[in-house]
Each structure stands twice: as structure tokens, then as C-alpha cells.
Amino acid sequence: MASPYYLFASNIGRCITTALACCVVVYLTSRQWQLRNRTVPISVNYHFTRKCNKTCKFCFHTEKSSHVATEQQMKKGLKLLKDAGMRKINFAGGEPLRYPKELAMLCRYCKEDLELESVSIISNGTLLKKKWLEQNGKFVDVMGISCDSFNEDTNEAIGRGSGRNVEQLFAIRQWCLELGIKFKLNTVVCKLNWQEDMVATIAELDPFRWKCFQVLFVEDENDASRAQTKDDKRKRDARELLISKEQFEAFCGKHEHLSCFVPEPNNLMASSYLILDEYLCFLDKGSGREKQSACILHVGVDRALQEINWDRAAFVKRGGEYDWSRGVSGDADGCGDGLPKKYEF
Ligand code: SF4
């Protein structure tokens, strides 16, 4: 007959083995759950500078700092994002062409070294030179230009005007065509342009995608008082340019038959963009005060993403994943194909 000591020792051994097995199962299950539910930053907008040569009243990424990360920091951050699942990068600002050398380096690194599916730029177009595009266009899939009106007075009143926006737009469109870069247009619909009929010139410009945003109010970005905007030229107040849902719908109703038309009302736009700022922190411009995550170089991509709210469902709903690689595509009327035609407010 086994001694009481032997029985005690063997039971303890079994208990410890069972407890260890349970811990392993719990760990593996929670790890699987984490992996299944982790946010993959498929498409990232990297606003590497806040400096701009324009003064749009509705700007929601204002010059709160003049910081620009070093080349080494930028490359390290981009590599972390690629390892976390990034497939598309969009370089934005401020005005990214305020730093043409850095922009060229970033595009080349993302296309050649990281081999991203898509590298795009969104610019106000005023600083873009044909030579820059000839030298660096092979690293760019999509060139997006912001233009809010085909009336130069309206552009001037908004703060984005140069007096020759439309002329420059047609020139850029031609350069993109020659170099095989997709040409995209962005328009912010606001109090000064919601009644404009842009159909004829859009058809002529023939973008593969025309995104129309309802002007967005963001606390801490474009909520300055009139006195503050007078004292500090970097401050913005978008209040006087805000429009109602009905006014945005009226603009959409006029243009929705164009196949390149992609409307983005406030509810789709607010948290559907993954925005990385000049400090390599994610920003959440959803409802309320703008939130900033910790820097991805310090805490990694997964942890930083957990600190903000990215509305992946809204990203999918606004057609965030599309045919975003280089090469010209289009249907018979010139506008791009395969784009979401339906929208909900
Ligand atoms: S919205 Fe206007 S001011 Fe702001 S970054 Fe774009 S072009 Fe510059």
C-alpha cells in the first residue's frame, strides 16, 4: 500500500501539471484572440509636416509645430508599419512638397525598399514641378491634388488660391498621364462652393477618383476664435465655412452621376483615416478633442493603435480599399472604374 506521503506528492505533481497546461491553453487562446482582433494598418496617411504655403480657413491639420522627423526615424517608423501590415501609404501635410527632397526619399524608400502596393501624395499642387515628377514619378502610384473650385476668386476666398489653380491642375493632369501616374482630385465642400456646378471641368480633367469631403470641424485644429486667427496666422477657424447635411447632399446630387465621384460626409470621414503625425504618433480626429497616441518608435504599432479609435467599418464603407496601384485605368467617359457609387449620410 502506498504511503500517505507518496500519495500526497503524486497528487501535487498532477495538480501542478494540470495548472501549467491550463495556463498554456489560456495564453494560447488569448494570443489567438489578440492576433485575430488586432488592428492592421492597411492604409496610412503620414502627415510628416504641418507646414504649408497656403492658408485654407478650414484646414484641420494646422501648423501647431514645425517638427519634421529625421530620415532615420521616418524610415524606422515606416518599416514598423509595413511589418504590421501596411499596404498603402499616403504622404500628406501641411504641404508635403515644402520638403521635396524628403518627399522624394520617402516615396523611393516605400516603393523600392518596402515594396508597398501603393504610394500616393496629396498636395495643393502649387509647388509641384514637372522635373520633380519626372525624377520621382516612378515611385508614385497616385498623385492627388486638392482643388475646391474652378473659380479662382472662390479659391482665393478659401485661402488655397494662387490665381492659376486651374491652369496648374491641367498641367499636372498632363504630366501624370505622360508618366503613368494615377491622377486624383480632392475637394472640400464648404459654404463658398457647395452651390458650384463642377461637372464640366471635372469631366475634362478626368481624374480616376474625385473625393468630395464635407468640411470638417476639429477641436484643437480649426476652432480658433477670430481674435486668435488675427494674432497668429497659423490658427484657423472653420466655423464660418461649415455647411449642413442638406447642403452637402445638394452638392452630391449635382455630381453623383460622375463615376469618379466619391462623397465623404462628416460621419464617414471623422475616424475612418489612419493618420500618423509628424512625431510618428497616430491621431484621432473623430468626435470631440483630437487625441494623439504614443510614438510608434517607442511603443510599437499595435500599442499605439490601441490608444486611438480607428473606424475600420467606416474605412471599408467609404471605399478605402480600391485599385490603388500605378497605371492608368478608366472607363469610356474617362472617370475611374469600380468606385462606390452609393453613399449614406
Ligand atoms: S488644407 Fe490648405 S492650409 Fe491646410 S495643409 Fe491643405 S493646402 Fe495647406
Image: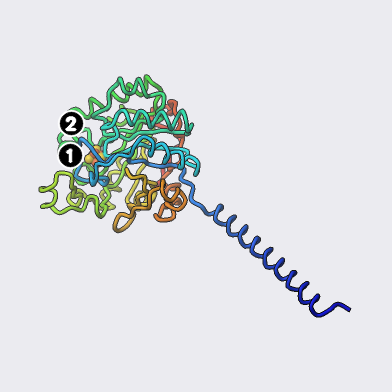
Image point 54% across, 55% down: which residue? 34
61 to 32, vertically: above or below: above
Q: Within 8 Å of ligand 1, the CB of disc 1?
A: yes
Q: Are marks 2 and 1 in contact (CB under 8 Å)?
A: no
The image quadrant in which ligand 1 is located: top left
Q: CA distance from mark 2 to mark 1?
A: 9 Å
Question: Which three-letter amino acid code belongs to the residue tagged 2?
Answer: Ser
User: Which quadrant is the N terminus positioned in?
Assistant: bottom right
Residue at image position (77%, 77%) is 8
Give the x, y percent position of residue 122. Answer: 32, 35
Q: Nearer the viewer, residue 172 or 332?
A: 172
Does the beta carbon at disc 2 come under 8 Å from ligand 1? no
Residue under label 2? 162
Q: Residue at x 35, y 28 (%)?
A: 104
Q: Is residue 258 at all visible to an observer of this figure?
A: no
The numbered dot on residue 304 is: none
Count of number-bearing discs = 2
Residue that lies at the very extreme toward the right in this rendered image: 1
Give 220 or 198, whichever is nearer the viewer.
220
* Relative image position of residue 279 (x, y in whole percent): 33, 45
Q: Quadrant of residue 89?
A: top left
Residue drawn where x is 15% and y is 36% of the image? 156
**Residue hosting label 1:** 159
